[in-house]
Image: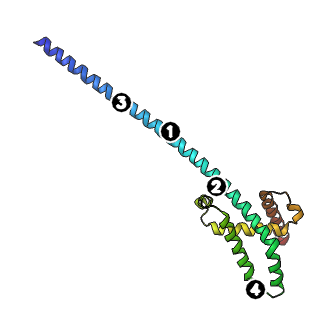
Amino acid sequence: MMREMLTDVAATTAMAVFTVGFCILCRNVQVAAGNWLDKMRDEAENENQEITVRMFEMASQLLSGITYNAVAAMEQTKAKEIRERVKAGLEDRDALKILAKDVLYGVKAQLTPDITETLERYIADLDAYIADQIEAYLIGIKQLPESRLIGVSTGEIMERSAESLAISLEEGEG
């Protein structure tokens, strides 16, 4: 009888130890799997962020190109004529503001909804941003002769415009 009791106690104790060991093993597997999933989730999120940044850079470059082309076309076709009429007193200065708005709407019309959404994710006021780009490109186009612009990238034009503007400001201060 004693022997049966000791066998039962030993079997019960062995089962308890086995159960606890199995529970600890399951918990360790659960923690390891959770850590692996967290790592995979973080890597996927980083990749998504990199893709989003690349998408924004491409959208921004596309916007710059479209804006520059629209400003150059506007300057070549309409702006000079309107400025001459304003100087002659035949037209109000508001015509130039209307022309700038037309360019802004023309640029926005050329952007696909996906490009617009990507830009708006990072730019709080897309209209104001485009208007600022229009002004910057307009300054650059006015200050740089056409012969110096042929075959030059938009980025180089902006760089040259910024340099020209800085030089103009320095000369104005001196």
Contact (Cβ within 8 Å) of mark 1 with mark 4 = no
Other-residue count near label 3 (Cα within 10 Å), few / some / many at <14 / 14–19 / ≥20 = few
Residue that mark 2 sits on: 56
Residue 129 showing in the rendered view: no
Image location of residue 101, percent across then percent down: 69, 74
The mark lying in front, picked from 3 and 4, is 4
Residue that mark 3 sits on: 26
The structure residue drawn at horizontal position 60% and vertical position 51%, both measured from the top left corner, is: 52
Image location of residue 35, percent across then percent down: 45, 36
* Secondary element type, mark 1: helix
Image location of residue 103, percent across then percent down: 71, 71
Q: Quadrant of residue 153?
A: bottom right
The mark lying in front, picked from 1 and 2, is 2
Other-residue count near label 4 (Cα within 10 Å), few / some / many at <14 / 14–19 / ≥20 = some
The mark lying in front, picked from 1 and 4, is 4
Contact (Cβ within 8 Å) of mark 3 with mark 4 = no
Residue 33 showing in the rendered view: yes
Residue that mark 4 sits on: 92
Colour pattern of the rendering:
rainbow
Q: Is residue 15 left or right of residue 24?
A: left
* Secondary element type, mark 3: helix
